[in-house]
Amino acid sequence: MSEQIYIGVDLGGTAIKVGICNEEGQLLHTYEGPTEVEKGADAVVNNIERYVRLILEQSPYDWDQLAGVGAGVAGFTNVRDGIIILAPNIGLKDVHIRSILEQRLGKPVRIDNDANVAALGEAWAGAGKGVGNCVCYTLGTGVGGGIIINGAIYQGFSGMAGELGHMAVVPDLEAIQCGCGKIGCLETVSSATGVIRMAKDAVERGDRTSLAQVENIMAKDVFDAAKAGDEAAIRIVSRAAFYLGKSLAQVSAVLNPQRFIIGGGVSKAGDILFNEVRSVYAKLTPEPLQEGVDIVPAILGNDAGMIGAAGLFLH
Amino acid sequence: MSEQIYIGVDLGGTAIKVGICNEEGQLLHTYEGPTEVEKGADAVVNNIERYVRLILEQSPYDWDQLAGVGAGVAGFTNVRDGIIILAPNIGLKDVHIRSILEQRLGKPVRIDNDANVAALGEAWAGAGKGVGNCVCYTLGTGVGGGIIINGAIYQGFSGMAGELGHMAVVPDLEAIQCGCGKIGCLETVSSATGVIRMAKDAVERGDRTSLAQVENIMAKDVFDAAKAGDEAAIRIVSRAAFYLGKSLAQVSAVLNPQRFIIGGGVSKAGDILFNEVRSVYAKLTPEPLQEGVDIVPAILGNDAGMIGAAGLFLH
């Protein structure tokens, strides 16, 4: 029999990315089309089906080789029943996506949220390859997380394990409210949004910083300024790194994973971030828990979602 | 064939407690003898063997019914290879306890550390009965922890998962050094040792408190004073509860367990502790993660170790 393939779908608010993977997690072929949120839920679901069919037609693979379609969704999902509970940026609510797609495609479908599938992608075929127990952070607009135990996504009691962005690591005295309604969440400081907020605060209160000259501050501006020696920017990156490192230390004491994988836009800050994260982690984690554990950058970038979604069938 | 039984051994620095359990986790018969640490490692191992044989002789069960012997050890263990790496209070170091006991008893033997087996006991036959995913805290001299996933102890990468006492939850400004060498660990505030230290500090610095009249302050004295309305004592219990609740919130975001079980001497403080823990947890944990999750006291007391050790064979 010819090689089996899997299609991974990365369903976002702007684009739907579909990728063909083999059983080793190699991305063989990709396609990207608009989500067309503005046309409504039916159009979005139609687009998923259309792009899945399109990519196979464009590829050298046959429909018969397709063993399953996995999807990572930017929103809340019910993994067991294959339902998108709420995906505000995609305009989907209570959509039984698995049964709809299984009926239309005649193939098995699995779904999970985007942070989980990105974690699975990295753990399976990226920075965590060969390591069974990883914890992944995605530092983007928010902070997403995924817990990989024995090579599979760990869901927890109600499917909410790995909500690492909502670890309450910032002490009350310097905490602000998070989008989730609680205070002190990691994502208020270690996300791109958090970094930008801290930069704008610094400019507004008149700190001496080169960021005052930047029109519309982005996270990258802050990293560039920090690398150039701007003290306010260095403080901001240090603070993002400090609470991230603190969160890693807590996760270590709870789960004792072998590897931490850190991806997303903020991770592009590079050494200036990673050095501080490693140093805080080392300071707060008992020695025996540190042994053999490493903290590494993600390597798959935006492909992690497609690969991990395809990987839902193999883990 | 007649009912199978399991013997659980709780190996502590003062006493060795052995208990006969059935497959439902019911404790049918117990025996307790001195550890005799002062006589050396061989004597301790001999005592384990002796007490296991003794309890069976005293019981209505036959040697043939014994399906396995599990042991919980107050120290560092290598679960996979059945080795006690270091148990300072029992005077054991690098003891291949599993192979030694298997040879002498002719029965399968399993070991784990005391916090893990106590957690398993509570999860299996105590406050976590019927709940697959629990996290247990034991607030004793230190703070022990155990992570139960799908009814079994979760070990992590190097067998150190569930070191909840070493979560760095106390911010630097008010943190002190822990026995593990790091600062800000949960057990510096939420253990009996932590409560006693805070009480002595309060007395030494001249706080107006009834504890100043107590000769040799124990944790229970602090709880009693708090219940009687002593403000300094109330502050101390609140602080122990605050960081415990904060730690629960972090664990929720990481693992999304269904139930938290809190045992050990400090948990005897009762409502004054639990109310505050629940309130801090509610304040710091996103609503969806709180749904269906509860925080309950352990119910097995000192029997949890024997029961959980026996349970190593059934999970």
Image (tube, coloured by chain):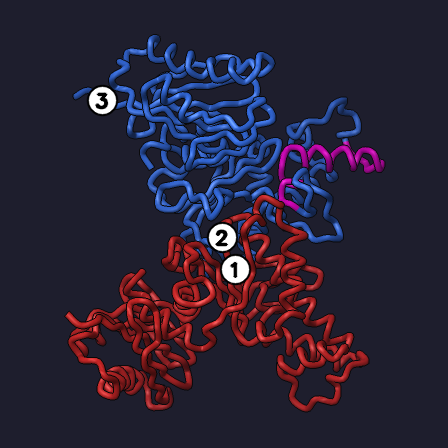
Chain colours: A blue, B red
Please give the count of numbered marks on the rendered protein: 3
Chain to which mark 2 belongs? B
The answer to the question of whether label 1 and label 2 lie on touching residues, with beta carbons closer than 8 A, is yes
Residue B66 pos. (x, y %):
21, 74
B163 on left or right of A219: left
Which residue position holds label 3? A3
| Magenta extent | A185-209
| Residue B76 appears in the rendering | no
The CA distance from mark 1 to mark 3 is 46 Å
Place residue B311 in its image quadrant: bottom left
Residue A221 pos. (x, y %):
68, 28
Instruction: Name the residue type under label 3.
Output: Glu
Q: Is residue B57 above or below residue A51?
A: below
Place residue A182 in its image quadrant: top right
Instruction: Please tell me the numbered disc located at residue B257.
Output: 2
Place residue B188 in its image quadrant: bottom right
